[in-house]
Amino acid sequence: MERLKNIDDLRSLRLDLSKETFKPDKNRIRICCGTACTATGSKKVVKAFDDEISRRNLDIEIVRTGCQGLCQKGPVMKLEPYGYFYQKVRQENVDVIVSTTYAAGFPVRSLLYRDTFLEKPVEFMEDVPFYKKQMRVALKNNGRIDPTNIHHYIAVGGYGAAEKVFSSMSPEQVIDEVKKSNLRGRGGAGFPTGVKWAHTRRAPGTIKMVIANGDEGDPGAFMDRSIMEGDPHGLLEGMLICAYAVDAHYGFIYVRHEYPLAVKNLRIAISQAEQIGLLGRNILGTGFDFTIHIREGAGAFVCGEATALVASLEGKRGFPHARPPRVSEPGGGPWGYPANLNNVETFACVPPIIEKGADWFLSIGTPSSPGTKVFALTGKVKNTGLVEVPMGITLGEIVYDIGGGIMGNKKFKAIQTGGPSGGCIPSKYLNLPVDFDSLLKVGSMMGSGGMVVLDEDNCMVDVAKFFLSFTQAESCGKCPTCRIGTYQMLQILEKITSGKGEKGDIEKLEKIGKLVKAGSLCGLGQSAPNPVLTTIKYFRDEYEEHIHEKYCRARVCSGLGVFIIEHSECILCGLCKQACAFNAVKETRRGFFIDRDYCTKCKACYSICPVNAVKITKEMYARLEEELKIPYEKMEVIERRRKMTLKDILESRPYEIVTVHKNSAISDAVRKMTEKSVSGLFVVDDNNKLVSLFTERDIVRCVFDNTSFNETIEKTCMRDITTFDPSTEISSAIAIALRKKIRHLPVVEGDRIIGMITFRDLVSYLLPEICFMAETMY
Amino acid sequence: MKVEELEVNKEIGEVGTILNDQEMKRGILIHALHHMQEHNGYLPGDELKKLSQKLYIPLSEIYSVASFYKMFHFKPRGKKVVKVCLGTACYVRGSKKLLTALESEFHVKSGETTEDLAITLETVGCVGCCGLAPVATINDEVTGEIVGDKRTVRLVNEIRRPD
């Protein structure tokens, strides 16, 4: 690459490049090669395309772009000149794409985006609901250019702002323009960028620095990663303009080590910019020097805080220090030199502002927060990914219009913004316009832009615990309130979620939370209690439910609720019994039940049940044995004794009611007994009412009396019978039967015949009980 | 890169011109630790001693810095480092379950290495692939949408597969 000697060189290079690159009528495929799409196989797709193109000798240009946003449907691609947008492309589809789209000009229908299976496919990217409401400023080049090719960036107008700055603007004018645009820091706090720049410029001393904060530690946020991966030159240009404005000659980009692709692409971009003369000594012949170095973090969330980042940059432990001195003041920056530290996204917003003017920027968004903001929309929404929207859009629009609503049509519960420093916003604020101030008003914050959508299956106490455990682990340990306070809060939350919550815990959490906020030095500690405090504010009932009723409505927290097996839904597969490590699932004749004395509420049965017959319910009634102070070991005996009625015997086996009419002949009755192989029959009258019994005993008597078998039963065998109610206890039934010397026990409920119990039934039913008693004795 | 090959002036870059010797050496410390870890897989004690002599920083301070950052390890790590993302998006989509499944599959706790030094299981705050949640990485290669038993088994096979 030839070094550009002056501004005119850059102009003519751009003119040349714009003629050859990205000609509108050329065949071109822009494939997303961001981290997410690479994970779903975009590298393989690119290779397949390359093979196919060289095999068929086609004229198709492949552009490996940065993140295009719709990560969940990756790998995604845009086909030009047609404009078709394909999602979830696999390498097997490549040859269909080439033959259908490039040979015939038709879209491949199976690869087009569909909202749901029942809706029509969408052909063009602009019509996909996910992209419809978006407006791209910071991400304008993401998905358009190859981040590893500086010529692409220049061809689409890149370094135009730097050119404008160097050719026609004084540093003061640049700062004024940024000030006028009211660009607020995208890292979270929303401090006006222009004011910060002016601060740094005013700082005494000749050596100054520019630092880009790419230590995006927020779990659930990845906008900085996408910018560094997909448009590294945009960041470099923003930093270059800043360096010019504040008169700095040294730049650093502090990147998380977890983003290897971002580091790689930034390295390539820096070396290209240095080769072409847009970085380094004597930039574009203006005499201005500016170098940029990459510093990799090493996995410490607190290093996203400005002063901690500076310490880390110097090679020390990432401890924040008290301000003042601020980073922009002497003594505050790295090695004591004043430095201007901004978020990556903030820098990416600068070139468009300079190029198009502050008024253009002010026309987007809300008066207090102009411009756009990139959000990482994740969690339980249908379309997850990176979205850039004008400020002032409502939360509902983001969740439902762009995100496509909640997965599985569940109920929206809350949206978590701002990562571990932010808070949870409940559904009543879905109409809230999103900007820095409105989010602060409802107790949350913009943060770096993570938006995690929670549905009814998420437990708010558990979510608060998750964030707190994150900040607790990431607390650097310098301030006692943060180090000890977050730990204590976490302990209380652990207690609540494991079912040991006590009255007063919520108040204690609030108290400690306020203390941690007040007594911590840096942003981490000051905002660490936010997730807990906002969830208490908006979802206090859930906390109370955990503490007082020992119940988690989302069924997330283990150790809460009562586990039961719903017999009407149970398919008797026995998986729950196998899964239980504590033998709490007991098998009975009728099915399975969970013994609450053994149950540890580990949820093993709940998660393994294939038909969701294991239910977690609220404790609906007081436990009798606790009320009556019956020892636990006696309970099983009592339980078993409860199951000792005649009805239980009848239900324990299949049975048939065999009746005979009182006017039938004895021979008929005998035939029926043989056919059904029973030892006794119910004798009924015309109304099917039980009048007597006919048993084997009667046959013996008839033979002895020499009665003719043609006689009717009514004439020969009628007698008074003893009937039993189904609720009769077995022991009293046996006593009555012994006294009356009967072997057949007719069970009747009112006039209705329920069944017949013989002595054999009694013995077979009682056998396990005898075994049980024998076992417990020894 | 070995400690002996470390060139302080080159690593620190242009900014070295305004720094004194000790500041420069200090400035590349984290960078040097990264290199050492990349080369050895972890930070061996005697290498750290060499680094201390080379950079003229007390060994205790090197340990102080290295132990502050979660990414540095003082024990040998497995050939395959499996990181389960416990970022918010992954967490709400059930990455905890995945972690427990892997823990019981390989009989290690998170943060531990199997005895044969084949696999190290770790958690990570966020890998920035929230769109594909829940995700896990095997030696920095991301696998996404690991929902359900089938996907988990596939991941386990992927981890087990010899290279």
Image: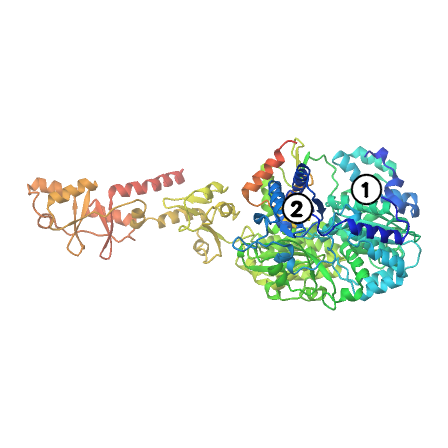
Name the residue type under label 1. Answer: His
State the image quarter where residue B41 is shown: top right
Picture layout, residue A27 above or below residue A246: above
Picture layout, residue A363 above or below residue A657: below
Identify the mark at residue A639; answer none if there is no mark.
none
Q: Is residue A499 visible?
A: yes
* Image x and y of residue B67, in percent: 76, 43
Query: Between marks 2 and 1, how big is the CA–CA gap?
Result: 29 Å
State the image quarter where residue A197 is shown: bottom right
* Camera-nearest label, 2 or 1: 2
Check the residue under mark 1 and report the chain it is in: B
Picture layout, residue B76 above or below residue A698: above
Q: In this figure, which residue is indicated by the disc labeled 1?
A: B31
* Image x and y of residue A225, in percent: 73, 50
Badge 1 crowding class, 10 Å Cα cut-off, few under 14, some 14 to 19, many 20 or more, is many
Mark 2 element type: helix
* Image side of residue A774 versus residue A313, left or right: left
The C terminus of chain A sits in image quarter:
top left
* Image side of residue A743 versus residue B149, left or right: left
Q: Is residue A516 visible?
A: no
* Image x and y of residue A251, in percent: 85, 51
The residue at the far front in this view is: A104
Nearer to me, B84 or A739? B84
* Image x and y of residue A260, in percent: 74, 43
Mark 1 element type: helix
Check the residue under mark 2 and report the chain it is in: A
Nearer to me, A223 or A549? A223
Q: In this figure, which residue is indicated by the disc labeled 2?
A: A37
The residue at the far bottom in this view is: A367
Label 2 and label 1 in one chain: no
Name the residue type under label 2. Answer: Cys
Q: Residue at x 75, y 54 (%)?
A: A480
